[in-house]
Amino acid sequence: MRRFVKKSNGSIILLYNGYKYSKNGLIGKGGTRFACSKLFSMKCKAFIHVSKDNIFIKANTEHNHIRPRFILNVNKAHFITLVSGKKLLMYKGYTYSRNGNIRGGGSRYACSLLSKGCKAYLHLTWDNILLFAKDVHPHEPLKFTLTQSGYKRRSSLQPWRGISTSWYSDESTSTSSEENEVYKLEPITLKKILVRNGKTFLMYKGYTYCRKSILKCGVRYVCTQTSQCRSYMIISDDGHILKLVEKHEHRKPRYHVASDGTYYRINFYQLVSKRNKSQFRQNVSNAERIYVRSAYEAKERCTVRVYVVVAMPRLHHSIICGEHREVGHRSCTSTASLCPNVKRDLDPVVIMENGKENLFHNGYLYFKKYGSKSGTKWNCTTTSKCSAFIYMTHDNSNILYSNTAHNHPRKNIFKLSSGRYIRV
């Protein structure tokens, strides 16, 4: 069997008995010399002389290598047979399977990715002549490798990208290249977690990722520290990591796993030094009742205690000061007020049943209006009737200014078993 195939770059190759020949020169009377494509890489001396009428004049078809495996992609409609024995119709690189009959005894062929939403189809006569083609596809063509037993679909995963996951698939997977090299995929720990606001994150190596956008090849997940971190991963439709970029410059988030399997972020205040002054800085908002052990952290040669925020049962928060030890840093000399066993009351930020965060202060509920560099403004939840508000620092430790003249009675809230609050 011989066939002339035009490649995507415009060059002509000759396929003969499963071997590929490339144009190597010209011969007399307008003919062409085709040499084996392995002429330089494997020193193969096979060649074919073809006249201008495409007639074989002279040939040496003894090769010193096995038949290569290559991908056949031509623009003419033709049938291919898979390794499983199933026949598909290939047209312009896309494959179609028989989907029904048309008038006159012909057949209708639909795109192989019909289940994925592709509406492309072809109409063929009873003697397999193309009548009509709607060949607009919203996806890339499937790739096939030609083997001795038929065509075999190539995996969309690249060898260095494929990773089997514990929550997408329980079995490890593998991919094969055109040279039949098997790449074993290393299983990793990748799981879904449900956080307190009802969202689903992916956790990988202790870092969490949230869903960002949908791509042609899968779904893009970015690090939950979006404003600070540029790490992301792309997950395919069949549940594999296609691409992974890890550029984390922050520590791993800490979570507390509740009895119902929900993950709660552990939040804490940390003593930091800035311009020879010590101050408290809250990493993220606190709203849950989480008890954790304090830890040490070295910063600028100053060993300090991490102050854990504990949600108390009586709807108030306290900063529990631990031990403080000076190791020569100048800013540590101004922390006399942070002695052990000192407590300071804070107004709590509670999560309501609908998932919204409210500030509970003196029996009234406030919602977060906006935040600025100096602090956060909280307005009364009955905005249409009440103009009361509180402007506090970001850590909710000090009230900068406020208007607490309410024109309605106080609100009573009740804590549910889920840890959230409801107004009664």
Image: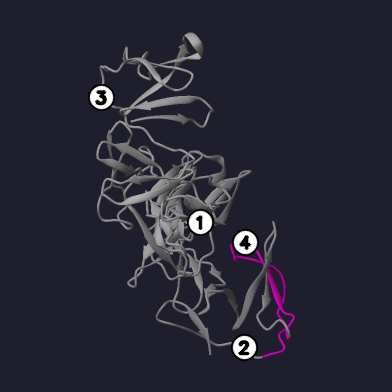
Q: Which residue is mark 3?
A: 66
* Label annotation for residue 394: 4
Alpha-carbon neighbours of circle 1 within 10 Å: few (<14), some, or many (≥20)? some
Q: Is residue 42 left or right of residue 352?
A: left
Label 2: state its secondary structure.
loop
Q: Is residue 325 above or below residue 400?
A: above
Q: On screen, 109 above or below 383? A: above
Q: Could you tell me how far apart the alpha carbons at marks 1 and 4 are, in whole angstroms?
A: 56 Å
* Label 1–label 3 contact, CB within 8 A: no
The residue located at (40%, 36%) in the rendering is 72
Q: CA distance from mark 1 to mark 3?
A: 38 Å
Q: Secondary structure at mark 1?
A: loop
Which quadrant of the figure contains the N terminus?
top left
Q: Tell me which label, 1 or 4, sits earlier in the chain.
A: 1
| Residue 192, picture quadrant | bottom left
Which of pointers 2 and 3 indicates the residue nearer the eye?
3
Query: Residue 179 location in percent, x, y?
Result: 30, 31
- Helix, strand or loop for disc 4: loop
Vertical position of residue 348 compared to residue 42: above or below: below
Q: CA distance from mark 1 to mark 2?
A: 64 Å
Q: Which residues are magenta?
A: 385-408
Whether residue 407 is in magenta: the answer is yes
Query: Badge 2 local density, few (<14 within 10 Å), some, or many (20+)?
Result: few
**Among the two numbered marks 1 and 2 on one chain, the one whose residue lies closer to the N terminus:** 1
Q: Which residue is mark 2?
A: 410
